[in-house]
Each structure stands twice: as C-alpha cells, then as structure tokens.
C-alpha cells in the first residue's frame, strides 16, 4: 500500500536529545576531523569546538562522511553577501526529512483524496522553508527568467490538474529577494493573483514590504529563518508568541559573542548542530552561523526558545561595554528605515538580470529593495562615528535629517546610547553606483 492516511504517525514525539546523542557518536566515529580530535572518546556537546564556517570550507574533506558518493552539492550560506559555501547531501537525508515532515515511511505517499491544495517553493534548491501539513505537497520551482514567472502565473490562475480535479496553489515559500522580484513582475504586467499564503525567508522582511505583500497577495505573510547548510532546519513564525522557533530536527545554542556562555535572554550568536538522520554526509557540529539573534525567552506554547533575527555579525554596530559587546544598531533596523524612503536608490541588479533577454520595459522596483553599507570610523575629535551609506537620486541635507530622525524612532535607545558611549550617527548620501566605489562591503536587502 503506497499511500498513508493522515493521523498515522511514523515518528514518535520529538526526540532531539536522542538524535543529538546519536549524532555525536556518529561524527566521532565517521568524520575525520572529530575522529582525530577525540580518538574514540565519548565527548559531550560542550567539549566540541565551535565550527568555523571558513575552516569547514577550506578543509572540506575533513568534515565529510564519504561512505558512498554524495548525490547533491548545494551552494549555501550566501545570503546577504556572505561568501557562499558548498554542502554535500544524499538522497537518504531527503527521504528522512520527507518522512519526518509528512509522517510517512519511505516509499509511501499521500492518498490522492487527502490532497486538496498545494504549494510551491521558489529557487530554494530543495531547502523547504517551512513545515507543511500532511497531504500538502510542495513543488520546487526555479525563477530565473520570465518563462518561469509565467509558469507560476499559470499555476496561480488555473491550479493543477490531479486525480480528476483542479487543485489550487495556496502557498508560496521563497526568499525575500525572489518574492520581491515576482511581485514586481506581476504588478508590472497587471496580474492580480488569487489569495496566497506566503512563507518568506532568506533575510529580514521589512514592515513596508510585509504590508505590500499582504495587500498584493491577499493572504498571511509569515517569516521563516532558514539555514541552507542544514537539511530541514528552518525556524518559523509562532502564532502564539509572534517570534521564531526552530524545529526539533536541529540542535540550537544561543551563546555570548565570545562563545564562553549560553544566553537565555538578549543578544546572542546563533550556533547550530545538525542532527542524524537528517544530515549524514556533511554534519555540522556547533556551527557558528555568524548570525546574531535576540533571545526572547521560552515560549510556553511551543516549549521552545523564541528569538528574533538581527542580522549578520558584521552588519551590526557594537560598542564594548562591561567587557562584553553591546549592540547599538543593526542592519535590520537600518533596512526598516530605508524602506520608507523613495528618494533612496533601489538595487535593480536582479530586475535587470531577470529581463536581460526580454524587452518588456522596466519593472517597477521602487518599493524598497535597497543597498546600503554600515561602518564605523574615528571622528576628528576621537569620537566614534557610525556611518550609514546609501545611494540617492539627489543629495539633500533635509533627507539626511529625515533618515536620522527615523532611525531614532526605530531605535528608541539610540539617543541614550550615543550619549553614553560618545557615538555620533552619520548618514552618507552617495550618487548611484557610489557604494561600489566606496569599496566597503554593502548589504543587499
Ligand atoms: Zn512561540
């Protein structure tokens, strides 16, 4: 019997601690780096060193289990301009994830009668952003050219013919970048989609864009925090507390910036451990994601730690305070503010790429797809200057002041912090193309 009815669980209750114990045993016996390090001892998780992504990239074979040839190679970890890495995967991992997601055994699939609607996941490389319910298939689709966009439009308009019925497309799961592109394209071509639920990951989604997406797609917009390096380890929005939680298929640690202690409330580095059997070829133990989150305590409903994504470590401006780092402003705060200003130039690289072989005229991209850089420097009087650089259509002092005022409204403690730590906030307005010429890394929202 190839089909499985719902309410027939294959996996028992979440078993993160057993999976973790199994994972640690597995890597000490099979991963060259840990084999050498522990010499068949039985270390606990906190005896493992944090895994630096750069070391993992340059000594990749030290971190692989090659008991058979891998089936996939994914580029990963490249969001927000960080250097992308490679991740090895195999079919069994996908099968394990699929079985876990849908509560089914290998080889089983939904009974046709349970399928009433379906979703698509755009350009996610087989990395599903969220957990769909039983009987809700999700198809992966690229979005590299207008043909793909038209195919998505067809599915939205007509649904999909299956088992003698038309089944509607009701969820789109994709990154912030891709949904902006798809939305702008549909707006430019006058397409009015049916109501769709969006699951958006990849980076922070600003309030301006969230509202715009809600209005255009006429459905709920939920945020997802995804880590491509892991197989099915994406945190999703919680209806109860409104923050993010990871699923039980990944082991999560929130640690201080120096890595010395765990954090239960406030700013922390996000450290993740992949779990067996969802990751077997390329396990990552105590993986230092480089992302900073704000821990918001335990959610009583989900019985998991809640958190908010604050951005990459290098995209946050800190000061030293009481021997620790104190966050003054993050790229997420800046993105929220910049999206309010139409005078700031948009990042049109993707839109140009999308249209390169077609002559459809410009796609409206004036809804806040911004490029910016944040940096710090020493002022003439020795004070610390935090500088936000953006490209603008026309330079004017009044715009600079409005951006600064909005930053202060966005970050209520900013004024006090500036006084306390002797910081001055500057907004650097550049002509189009000026960020590249500036020669510092910039952030693509
Ligand atoms: Zn919650």
Image (cartoon, helix red, strand yellow):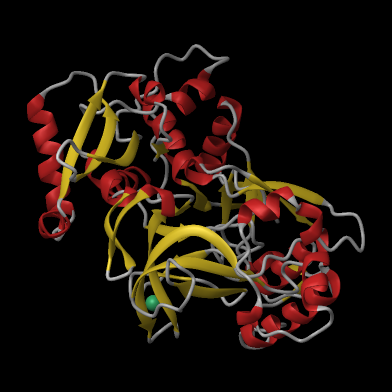
- Percent of width and height locating residue 109: 75, 67
Of residues 67 and 55, the one drawn nearer to the viewer in this rendering: 55
Tell me the quarter of the image containing the N terminus: bottom right
Of residues 12 and 192, the one drawn nearer to the viewer in this rendering: 12
In this rendering, does residue 108 appear at all? yes
Q: From the viewer's perspective, is residue 36 above or below residue 122?
A: below
Q: From the viewer's perspective, is residue 74 above or below residue 30?
A: above
- Percent of width and height locating residue 377: 28, 40
Q: Residue furthest top?
A: 359
Name the quarter showing ligand 1. Answer: bottom left
**Splitting the image into 4 quarters, where does residue 43 fall?**
bottom right
Q: Is residue 396 left or right of residue 56?
A: left
Tell me the quarter of the image containing the C terminus: top left
**Splitting the image into 4 quarters, where does residue 234 fall?**
bottom right
Q: Residue at image x 34%, y 37%?
A: 373
Q: Residue at image x 19%, y 43%?
A: 382
Q: Residue at image x 85%, y 76%?
A: 29
Of residues 433 and 124, the one drawn nearer to the viewer in this rendering: 433
- Percent of width and height locating residue 267: 35, 68
- Percent of width and height locating residue 26: 80, 77
Q: From the viewer's perspective, is residue 145 above or below residue 175?
A: above
Number of callouts in the render?
0
In this rendering, does residue 106 appear at all? no
Q: Residue furthest right?
A: 68
Q: Residue at image x 30%, y 44%?
A: 335
Of residues 169 and 200, the one drawn nearer to the viewer in this rendering: 200
**Splitting the image into 4 quarters, where does residue 64 fall?**
bottom right
């Amino acid at each position: 019997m190839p089909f499985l009815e719902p309410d027939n669980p294959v996996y028992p209750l979440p078993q993160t601690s057993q999976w973790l114990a199994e994972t640690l045993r597995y890597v000490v016996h099979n991963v060259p780096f840990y084999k050498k390090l522990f010499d068949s001892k039985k270390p606990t998780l906190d005896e493992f060193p944090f895994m630096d992504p750069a070391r993992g990239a340059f000594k990749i074979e030290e971190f692989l289990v090659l008991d058979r040839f891998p089936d996939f190679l994914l580029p990963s970890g490249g969001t927000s301009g960080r250097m992308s890495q490679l991740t090895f995967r195999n079919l069994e991992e996908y099968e394990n994830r699929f079985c876990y997601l849908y509560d089914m055994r290998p080889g089983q699939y939904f009974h046709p009668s349970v399928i009433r609607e379906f979703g698509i996941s755009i350009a996610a490389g087989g990395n599903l952003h969220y957990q769909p319910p039983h009987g809700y298939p999700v198809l992966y689709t690229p979005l590299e050219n207008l043909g793909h966009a038209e195919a998505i439009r067809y599915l939205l308009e007509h649904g999909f013919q299956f088992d003698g019925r038309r089944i509607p497309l009701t969820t789109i799961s994709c990154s912030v970048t891709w949904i902006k592109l798809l939305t702008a394209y549909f707006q430019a071509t006058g397409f009015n989609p049916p109501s769709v639920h969006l699951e958006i990951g990849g980076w922070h989604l600003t309030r301006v864009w969230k509202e715009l997406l809600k209005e255009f797609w006429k459905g709920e917009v939920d945020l997802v925090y995804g880590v491509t390096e892991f197989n099915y380890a994406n945190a999703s929005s919680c209806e109860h507390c409104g923050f993010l939680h990871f699923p039980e298929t990944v082991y999560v640690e929130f640690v201080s910036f120096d890595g010395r202690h765990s954090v239960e409330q406030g700013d922390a580095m996000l450290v993740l451990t992949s779990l067996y059997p969802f990751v077997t070829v390329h396990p990552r133990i105590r993986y230092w994601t480089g992302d900073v989150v704000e821990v918001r305590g335990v959610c009583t409903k989900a019985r998991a730690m809640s958190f908010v994504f604050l951005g990459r470590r290098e995209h946050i401006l800190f000061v030293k305070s009481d021997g620790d780092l104190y966050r003054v402003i993050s790229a997420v705060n800046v993105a929220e503010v910049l999206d309010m200003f139409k005078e700031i130039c948009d990042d049109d690289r993707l839109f140009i790429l999308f249209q390169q072989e077609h002559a459809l005229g410009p796609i409206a991209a004036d809804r806040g797809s911004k490029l910016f850089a944040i940096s710090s420097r020493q002022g003439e009087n020795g004070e610390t200057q935090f500088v936000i650089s953006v490209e603008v259509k026309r330079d004017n002092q009044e715009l600079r002041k409005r951006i600064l005022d909005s930053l202060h409204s966005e970050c209520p403690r900013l004024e006090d912090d500036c006084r306390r730590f002797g910081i001055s906030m500057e907004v650097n307005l550049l002509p189009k193309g000026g960020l590249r010429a500036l020669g510092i890394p910039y952030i693509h929202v």
